[in-house]
Image: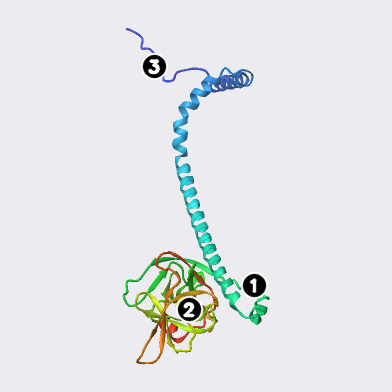
Amino acid sequence: MQEQATIRLFKRGPTAEFRLFVFVILSLALIVIDARWRVLDPAREAVSVALYPFQRAVMMPRDAISAVSNWTDAASTARTEKEALQRQRIELAQIATHAAQLSAENQQLRRLLSVADMVVQPSVAVEVLYEPPNVFTRHLVFDKGRNSGIMSGMPVIDEGGVVGQIVRVTPFTSEAALITDEKVSIPVQVLRNGLRLIAFGGHPGGKVEVRYLTNETDITPGDVLVTSGVGGLFPAGLSVAKVDEIQRDNASGFSKAVATPLSHPERYRHFLVLRVEPTLSEAVKDEADG
């Protein structure tokens, strides 16, 4: 009978301590060789090339987040610079109008204005969200409201002059009635001679009119109307309109001047809301409450 062979359950080999000692010696040898000679550079390059796709795959989320962040920052910077340039363009145009008005003032007014060459009104740059589809009113809705310091009654301007005034405000939007709207009236004066009048909206064809003129009223076609500052709602010196013609009403015996607004709300999307402290008339209050 053959003797049964003993079954070996575990392979015997070097002990763990011996293997650790060998690996430590091998590591030290590789460190010394790598420090003194460059024989391991090809192996290092081969490992680097093999690991490069995995490195890029691991870094893709970081690169994506960085790209989105850079794009957002660039868009925000461009929007801020655009608003600043638009504000500067409008303010420079208004400075020119103020200079023309100051040249027509009398000597006493010039002495008073020598204290401050110009009163700079704080303003808010706004953008048109949409124009309400209403054939009976001329309104614009802007993208900023009460949270930006806008209040009902504040004037709206562009580089040409007065666009209208705020009539309704919410925390995030505001609505302005254009000067051609029949509910808007603006105290004005003739830039040529300082004659104070009131311009009303509601004239057909997108124009404004000055009503109840007598034969002695010194106003002619070509005269420029600017805000007079009476009432404290609109600052003095803002361009309003240019007189086209004088129409006489034989039935009433009065005349009216028809003028074309110098602002262009139909051309632009950005405007300035002057942050004056408005004293609202009853008409503006009713419109704001409505």
* Residue 174 image position (x, y, % from top left): 43, 72
- Work out whether residue 211 or residue 35 is closer to the camera in this orientation and state it: 211
Q: CA distance from mark 1 to mark 2?
A: 26 Å
Decide: few, some or many residues near mark 3? Use Cα within 10 Å; few <14, some 14-19, many ≥20.
few
**Relative to 47, residue 200 above or below:** below
Where is mark 3, residue-wise?
Answer: 7
Residue contact at pointers 2 and 3, CB within 8 angstroms: no
* Residue 280 image position (x, y, % from top left): 49, 83
Query: What's the residue at 38%, 12% (across, down)?
Result: 5
Q: CA distance from mark 2 to mark 3?
A: 102 Å
Decide: few, some or many residues near mark 1? Use Cα within 10 Å; few <14, some 14-19, many ≥20.
few
Of pointers 1 and 2, the one earlier in the residue sequence: 1
Left or right of 94? Residue 2 is left
Where is mark 2, residue-wise?
Answer: 153
Q: Element at badge 3? A: loop
* Residue 254 image position (x, y, % from top left): 41, 90
- Work out whether residue 190 or residue 36 is closer to the camera in this orientation and state it: 190
Q: Splitting the image into 4 quarters, where does residue 122 fall?
A: bottom right
* Residue 75 image position (x, y, % from top left): 47, 53
* Amino acid type of the residue that numbered disc 1 sits on in the rendered structure: Asp
Q: CA distance from mark 1 to mark 3?
A: 110 Å
Where is mark 1, residue-wise?
Answer: 117
Of pointers 1 and 3, the one earlier in the residue sequence: 3
Query: What's the residue at 66%, 82% (across, down)?
Result: 108
Q: Element at badge 1? A: loop
* Amino acid type of the residue that numbered disc 2 sits on in the rendered structure: Gly
**Relative to 53, residue 119 above or below:** below
* Amino acid type of the residue that numbered disc 3 sits on in the rendered structure: Ile
Point out the residue furthest to the top here. 1
